[in-house]
Image (spheres, coloured by chain):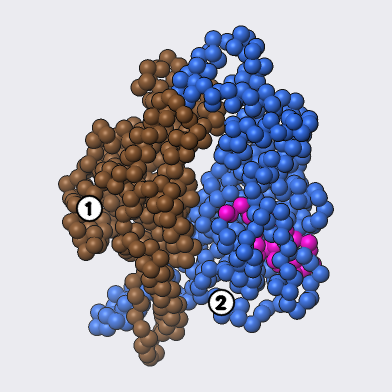
Chain colours: A brown, B blue
């Protein structure tokens, strides 16, 4: 599949995965790949500081959009700010600031579970409907919470029987269940626990949210190490052989996990390499974007 | 370094971000305490069944389940006990309500309230608070002399430190207090602002939501004093010298950042960190710095395969160096706190022997068992 076509499969892509699997790196990677394919991209970060901007040498994201790179804009989205905007949009400008300042959102959010999530998802839906970008990438909350986050609107439909919030929830549910408008890309690393969580999350999202799942991104894959070789009296011979034996063991464990994932979860996989760097730089993201584009090409 | 001093405490609280092996580490600590004759209970907040399965159980419930001694002490050397339970926030909260309610009718009114049902499961800080409540309950009931707990895997996990205070703050919230006025009076007495607020909320989410909230706070009247007292008692337990804090992390930069954040917050709260446990540490196979290995590889143009092998060693060594540098930041902050390292294991901890292998990395002079070393990657 051409990357441009991949980017057109849905206007909203939610990138989700357990903490520490490189969700934010994958979000940046897809954004750069999509921008190179001529799409204009908006990244929406929904759970506080993600470090997304660090690779682009920019300060932390805020509610107002910034230009992250050519063809890529980015912003954060918090429930409090979304609530104020919602109230202003619904003719309640006068009360909005005071309501937010008084901690009233806590009261409302407690009274109506999923209220925070619906405010954020409602705003994403609005961005989607206004065609704010060709592709909206949502850097989602960590895996377990991602399910709750995406299930909130359906749950809210049960709890709230009237009013604009119900309407909002209905609209969001409609978007989430429409594969042409929204899909989820799950990210994992090739290790046992993260993969188990990914499999659980995938089934929960499909069964309980009814959301379309895109390919699974297996991040931080190690390349196959070379086999044994007699290194004679090379000074580091013993250390090299011990390191390689260790690396070969890790690699076979990784391959077993990747194979297990393919059996348990019949979704296409995109593998990204482990860059083994301290912090992801713009150059790393460009490298990953090229690999991502090639991998999508062979889907 | 080992962290044996933890085994002398009455309560061990494991802190750390998600995915660093907190649940497994907590279980390994409890297992070792039981092996040394303590009546130990491990409390997990992780809803996954992994801990249950590791301990040889099919599932865990909200009441302590005993792990049969022959499973964890086949030689019959220990006089200790090993129990495990999984925190159920809602049922713990239900019991708190039942304890402080003036009468069963008041308790029932609260437990049936829709707003309460939301609050008890979802509100920020409830899980943290109930974890501490459970800890207090287990510590106080005298059946255990060693309780280990892992904290929720969120950045806000440390909220348990002020979770009791937070719940009280919620109850003290201005809006809440106004809502707590008797129904008929509140619209009369309440200021224009509050009326506006109520009308707005009703417009957005519907009138019945407001009715639930008002009913909840009316039902709650008279219980604050009991709550306050309990919250203070929980806070005393957290600050007690018999309570130990363990910071759990991996050497990855993001995990270390979080660990450092936790360390600062605990220090801010004047709580001492008693040990740090670092899971998933990469092994080092050479003393040679990675930069030198890379240089050597660069001279091997005639044998690219050998160069490649040098680069594999160099990359692993570079990882080791980076891990070391990352950890040093927290180690410096913690002063002379003991730090134990657990190597990257070749598989997840699935059973008691592998849990024991983790304990073997953490504690000194525990008898070694055949296969411990083989389990390490």
Q: Chain of mark 2?
A: B
**Residue B25 highlighted magenta (yes or no):** yes
Q: Nearer the viewer, residue A251 or A14?
A: A14
Q: Which disc, if any, is residue B155?
A: none
Q: Evaluate whether residue B318 shows in this view.
A: no
Percent coordinates x, y for residue A130 in the rendering: 25, 32
Which residue matches tag 2?
B375
Q: Is residue B322 left or right of residue B31?
A: left
Q: Chain of mark 1?
A: A
Identify whether A54 is placed above or below B228: below
Q: What residue is shown at x 44% (from left), y 43% (from top)? A: A151
Percent coordinates x, y for residue B290 in the rendering: 40, 70
Q: What residue is shown at x 41% (from left), y 73% (from top)? A: A256
Q: Quadrant of residue B162?
A: top right
Q: Quadrant of the N terminus of chain B?
A: bottom right
Q: How would you rate the neighbour count of disc 1 (Cα within 10 Å): few for under 14, some for 14-19, many for 20 or more?
A: some
Q: Nearer the viewer, residue B293 or B273?
A: B273
Which residue matches tag 1?
A6
Between marks 2 and 1, how big is the CA–CA gap? 43 Å
The magenta span reads B24-47
């Amino acid at each position: 599949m051409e990357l441009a076509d991949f980017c057109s499969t849905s206007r909203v892509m939610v990138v989700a995965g357990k903490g520490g699997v490189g969700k934010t790196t994958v979000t940046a990677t897809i954004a750069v790949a999509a921008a190179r394919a001529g799409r204009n991209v908006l990244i929406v970060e929904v759970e506080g500081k993600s470090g997304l901007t660090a690779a682009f040498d920019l300060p932390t994201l805020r509610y107002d959009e910034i230009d992250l790179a050519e063809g890529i804009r980015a912003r954060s989205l918090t429930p409090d700010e979304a609530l104020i905007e919602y109230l202003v949009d619904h003719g309640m400008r006068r009360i909005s600031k005071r309501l937010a300042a008084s901690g009233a959102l806590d009261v409302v959010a407690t009274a109506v579970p999923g209220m925070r999530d619906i405010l954020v998802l409602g705003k994403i839906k609005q961005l989607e409907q206004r065609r704010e970008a060709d592709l909206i990438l949502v850097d989602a909350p960590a895996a377990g919470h991602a399910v709750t986050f995406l299930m909130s609107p359906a749950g809210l439909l049960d709890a709230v029987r009237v009013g604009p919030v119900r309407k909002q929830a209905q609209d969001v549910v409609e978007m989430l269940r429409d594969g042409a408008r929204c899909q989820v890309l799950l990210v994992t690393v090739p290790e046992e626990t993260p993969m188990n969580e990914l499999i659980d999350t995938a089934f929960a999202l499909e069964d309980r949210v009814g959301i379309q799942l895109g390919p699974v991104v297996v991040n931080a894959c190690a390349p196959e190490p070379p086999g044994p070789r007699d290194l004679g009296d090379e000074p580091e011979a013993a250390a090299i052989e011990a390191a390689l034996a260790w690396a070969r063991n890790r690699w076979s464990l990784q391959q077993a996990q990747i194979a297990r994932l393919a059996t348990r979860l019949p979704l296409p996989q995109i593998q990204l390499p482990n860059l083994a760097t301290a912090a992801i730089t713009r150059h790393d993201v460009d490298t990953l974007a090229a690999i991502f584009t090639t991998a999508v090409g062979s889907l | 370094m080992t962290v044996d001093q933890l085994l002398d405490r009455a309560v061990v609280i494991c802190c750390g971000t998600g995915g660093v092996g907190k649940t497994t580490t907590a279980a390994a600590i409890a297992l070792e305490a039981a092996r040394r004759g303590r009546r130990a209970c491990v409390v997990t907040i992780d809803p996954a069944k992994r801990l249950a399965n590791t301990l040889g159980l099919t599932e865990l419930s909200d009441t302590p389940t005993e792990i049969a001694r022959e499973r964890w002490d086949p030689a019959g050397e220990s006089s200790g006990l090993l129990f495990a339970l999984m925190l159920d926030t809602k049922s713990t909260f239900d019991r708190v309500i039942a304890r402080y309610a003036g009468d069963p009718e008041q308790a029932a009114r609260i437990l049936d309230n829709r707003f309460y049902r939301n609050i008890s499961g979802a509100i920020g800080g409830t899980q943290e608070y109930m974890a501490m409540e459970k800890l207090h309950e287990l510590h106080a009931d005298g059946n255990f002399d060693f309780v280990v707990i892992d904290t929720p895997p969120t950045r806000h996990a440390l909220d348990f430190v002020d979770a009791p205070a937070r719940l009280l703050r919620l109850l003290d919230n201005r809006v809440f207090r106004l809502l707590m006025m008797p129904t008929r009076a509140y619209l009369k007495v309440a200021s224009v602002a509050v009326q506006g607020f109520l009308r707005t909320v009703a417009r957005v989410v519907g009138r019945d939501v407001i009715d639930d909230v008002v009913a909840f706070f009316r039902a709650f009247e008279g219980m604050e004093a009991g709550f306050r007292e309990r919250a203070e008692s929980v806070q005393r337990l957290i600050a007690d010298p018999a309570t130990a804090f363990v910071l759990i992390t991996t050497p990855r930069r993001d995990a270390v950042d979080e660990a450092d954040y936790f360390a600062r917050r605990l220090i801010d709260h004047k709580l001492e960190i008693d040990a740090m446990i670092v899971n998933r540490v990469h092994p080092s196979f050479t003393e040679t710095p990675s930069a030198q290995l890379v240089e050597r590889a660069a001279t091997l143009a005639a044998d690219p395969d050998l160069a490649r092998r040098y680069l594999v060693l160099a990359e692993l060594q570079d990882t080791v160096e980076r891990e070391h540098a990352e950890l040093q930041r927290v180690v410096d902050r913690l002063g002379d706190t003991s730090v134990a390292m657990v190597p990257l294991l070749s598989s997840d901890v699935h059973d008691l022997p592998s849990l024991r292998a983790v304990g073997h990395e953490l504690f000194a002079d525990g008898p070694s068992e055949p296969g411990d070393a083989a389990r390490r990657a």
